[in-house]
């Protein structure tokens, strides 16, 4: 059995900050865990529904500042949701999700109760890029509805999926959103230049978005796809429209990401674009 922890601060009836013998400060969440607790009280950590560390002092301060703005009955629900997400993802979540998702869900409740619709322009891209996170986000929305009767709009599913992805990869939401916006921009340029509309539910769209996503990842990691000079010359001759468009897309990526792009990317992009024109 774990040694008792010492209460440092009661944040509300359901959350306390405690001194842990091994981990220094921990945050304990549980229904009524903070009721009548005073600084210096010893409690058994097993009575908490959720115990987590916020090693980053800034993250911890954000969490402490956030809690007074979160309805107390939502805190145990947030804990249930985070436990559920961790189990379903089958891997640990980065600690910043405690702050980010609690903040997002609290505001989502406010929007839903006040009928403030929150659209998500990247919903199709998010579903395509992060199918597992998207599915779990759908389940989270169902859990919230079952426990509170509050129905979140579909736009929220995409945002919750992004928070889950961010917590697993430890990428910032800003970086993920920047890449999603870039992919959306590239798809619009493709549709405009090729005069096509790509069905967002089609396998072609799925392949295209996945390819753009992998290309962005390669640009960031400096990974190359090998010398394709012969193929490059052949595609330039055979498919000039798609070849020129692929370079236009590469220039947009270079500008937005502020990185050089391996010239061989043009070959693979041209092949993808040519496939679209044949549909």
Image (tube, rainbow, N blue to C red):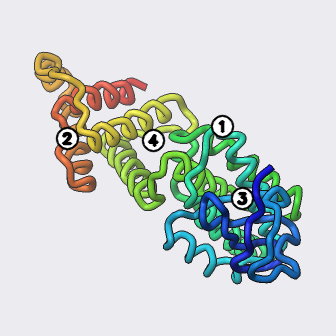
Q: Nearer the viewer, residue 154 or 101?
A: 101
Frontmost of labels 3 and 1 is 3
Residue sitting nearer the eye, 83 or 133: 83
> What is the x, y in percent for residue 215?
32, 37
Q: Secondary structure at mark 2?
A: loop
Structural crowding at the residue carrying mark 2, measured as other residues with C-alpha within 10 Å and reported as few (<14), some (14–19) or many (≥20)? many
Residue 175 percent location from the top left of the image: 40, 56
Q: CA distance from mark 1 to mark 2?
A: 34 Å
Cα–Cα span, label 2 and label 3: 44 Å
Q: Nearer the viewer, residue 221 or 267?
A: 221
The count of marks equals 4
Question: Label 4 neighbourhood size at 10 Å, few (<14), some (14-19), many (20+)?
Answer: few
In the image, 40: left or right of 255?
right
- In space, the residues marked 2 and 4 are separated at their CA atoms by 27 Å
Task: Check disc 2 and report the residue beneath it.
Answer: 261
Indicate which disc, 3 or 1, sits on the residue closer to the N terminus.
Answer: 3
- Whether residues under marks 2 and 4 lie with C-beta atoms below 8 angstroms apart, the answer is no
Tag in front: 2 or 4:
2
Q: Is residue 191 left or right of residue 225?
A: right
x%, y% of residue 171?
45, 52
| Residue in view at x 18 percent, y 35 percent | 262
Q: Residue 197, labelled with which disc?
A: 4
Task: Tell me, yes or no, if residue 262 can be seen here.
Answer: yes
Which structural element holds mark 4? loop
Question: Relative to residue 5, is residue 25 drawn left or right?
Answer: left
Q: Are marks 4 and 1 in contact (CB under 8 Å)?
A: no
Alpha carbons under labels 3 and 1: distance apart: 18 Å
Please give the name of the residue rendered at 39% of the width and 47% of the height, measured from the top-left corner.
183
Look at discs 1 and 2 and give the one toward the viewer.
Answer: 1
- Give me the disc on residue 51: 3
**Callout 1: few (<14), some (14-19), or many (20+) C-alpha neighbours within 10 Å?**
few
- Identify the element where label 3 is drawn: strand
């Amino acid at each position: 059995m774990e040694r008792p922890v010492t209460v440092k601060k009661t944040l509300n009836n359901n959350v306390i900050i405690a001194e842990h013998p091994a981990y220094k400060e921990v945050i304990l969440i549980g229904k009524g865990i903070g009721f009548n607790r005073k600084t210096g009280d010893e409690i058994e950590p097993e009575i908490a529904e959720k115990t987590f560390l916020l090693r980053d002092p800034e993250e911890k301060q954000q969490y402490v500042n956030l809690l007074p703005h979160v309805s107390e009955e939502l805190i145990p629900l947030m804990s249930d949701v985070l436990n559920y997400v961790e189990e379903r993802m089958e891997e640990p979540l980065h600690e910043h999700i405690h702050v980010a998702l609690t903040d997002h869900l609290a505001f989502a409740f406010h929007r839903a109760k006040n009928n403030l619709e929150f659209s998500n322009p990247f919903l199709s891209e998010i579903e395509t890029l992060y199918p597992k996170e998207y599915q779990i986000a759908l389940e989270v929305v169902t859990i919230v509805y079952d426990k509170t009767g509050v129905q979140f709009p579909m736009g929220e599913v995409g945002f919750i999926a992004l928070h889950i992805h961010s917590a697993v990869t430890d990428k910032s939401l800003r970086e993920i959103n920047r890449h999603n916006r870039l992919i959306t921009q590239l798809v619009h340029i493709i549709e405009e230049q090729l005069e096509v509309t790509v069905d967002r539910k089609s396998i072609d769209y799925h392949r295209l978005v996945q390819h753009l996503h992998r290309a962005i990842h390669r640009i960031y990691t400096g990974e190359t796809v090998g010398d394709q000079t012969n193929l490059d010359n052949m595609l330039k001759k055979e498919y000039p429209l798609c070849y020129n468009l692929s370079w236009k897309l590469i220039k947009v990526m270079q500008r937005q990401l502020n990185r050089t792009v391996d010239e061989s990317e043009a070959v693979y992009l041209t092949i993808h674009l040519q496939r679209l024109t044949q549909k």
